[in-house]
Amino acid sequence: MLTFIDMMTTRWEEPAPLASPALSDTYRSDVLNAMGAVVIEMDAEGHIQFINQACAKLTGATLSEIAGQDIQMLFSNPEEMQAVTQGFEELRSGRSRQVHVQMRWRGENASPRLLEGTCTARYDAYGQVEALVLVGVDVTEQHSLERDMAILNTTERRIVSESLHEQLGMQLAAMAIQVQNLKAAVERGESCTADDLEAIADAIRAGVGKARELSHTLMPVSLQQDRLGEALADLAREQEAQWSGTCTFIGDPNLPSIPNTATAMHLYRIAHEAVTNARTHATPNDIVIRLRAGRDALVLTIHNDGPNWHPKKQMNQPSGKGIARMRYRAHLIDATLKIAHMHGITMVTCRLPLHRLSDAA
């Protein structure tokens, strides 16, 4: 049996019934227990009547332990009770047939878990509310990753801002002083030599180079011009210049176009994260970045020969956040990401279906 839950928060409208009244309670329980989403059935007043296995795993409580108790006993944030209680009242009064809920629950290890989903009223033969059914998913990790990505973006912008002020700003200020001194000399009747103008030209060229370097920190120019392969080749050269090992890029000659800059940027960041993780945690001698076009997908692979890094062992280590960020970026563009370790080689593989190259957001 396969059970699917739509994870998009914009699609919580009008769900199909959880189970047909004709189904036996045992079969219905088996179906709900097979779901990966949390399911709680309450009476009209919000007292727990049934929880599935996903809920028991999330809360660390069995049905026998919490049956008959108010759903609010699971909340870890009392301030959220009012909003949820108001939603239940809308269901009971018939003003709404379904309400969106977001709440923090006490997790199995007392750590709050963020649950997001919907609550729907079930009616009896007389049109009266006989039960409230809550279906939700644990989005704690997702929200944590979103915060993590926001912090990364803020950090990158702060670095660029500081560099603009401390490096490029000072360089432009020095250039302005040079020009002002030359202007004063000309006003005094002194001659302006070719060397004077060449010094100013050198300063301008240096400023242009620094501006290009800072803009590359936010987004490589080649990505803006639909040249992902070129951006990855630059990444390999930059990384190799920073350590004693080798970092090589291999690109197919006829790569498909990626008109969506955001998609190209996510693929580039996945490669950057994989290389950084390898250098930091695996101490490899060689890293290879490869981009090729398969029959139905664009395939990005990054492999390293470092002996000290293994994906399963690293999930709870500092590099585990890097793995999570790579998976999150792949999810955003509807790509798949796999990490394998075999014969001393760790390989990160990201596959993006070709039909998603233009429309992935």
Image (cartoon, helix red, strand yellow):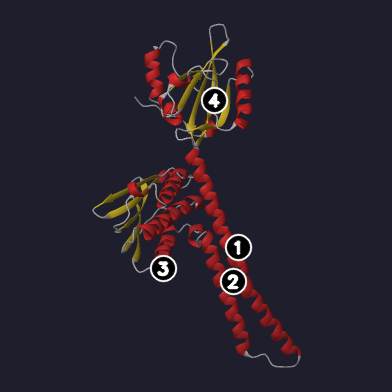
Q: Mark 1 is on which residue type?
A: Ser
Check disc 4 and report the residue beneath it.
73
Which quarter of the figure is the N terminus placed in? top left
Measure the alpha-carbon separation of dots 4 and 3: 54 Å
Picture residue at 23% right of the left edge, 53% below the top? 343
Residue 186: give x, y in percent of width and height.
Answer: 73, 89
**Residue type (three-letter) at the residue carrying disc 3:** Gln
Can you name the residue that lies furthest to the bottom here? 190
Looking at the rendered structure, the number of numbered marks drawn on it comes to 4
Counting from the top left corner in percent of width and height, residue 253 is at: 35, 59
Residue 196 in the figure: left or right of residue 269? right
Q: Earlier in the sequence, mark 1 or mark 3?
A: 1
Which structural element holds mark 1?
A: helix
Mark 3 element type: loop
Sequence-first disc among 4 and 3: 4
- The alpha-carbon separation of the residues under discs 2 and 1 comes to 10 Å
Between the C-alphas of marks 3 and 2, the distance is 21 Å
Front residue of 277/360: it is 277
Tell me if mark 3 has few (under 14), some (14-19) or many (20+) residues whose alpha carbon lies within 10 angstroms of its own.
few
The kind of residue on which mark 4 rests is Met
Q: How much space separates mark 2 and mark 4, taking CA atoms?
A: 56 Å
Q: Residue at x 47, y 57 (%)?
A: 226
Residue type (three-letter) at the residue carrying disc 2? Gln
Q: Position of residue 336 (x, y in %)?
A: 38, 44
| Image marks 2 and 1: residues in contact by CB distance under 8 Å | no
Residue named by callout 2: 167
* Circle 2 Cα neighbour tier, 10 Å, few/some/many (<14 / 14–19 / ≥20): some
Earlier sequence position, callout 2 versus callout 4: 4
Q: Which residue corresponds to mark 1?
A: 161
Question: Relative to residue 118, is residue 312 depicted above or below?
Answer: below
Identify the mark at residue 242; answer none if there is no mark. Answer: 3
Cα distance between the residues tagged 4 and 1: 47 Å
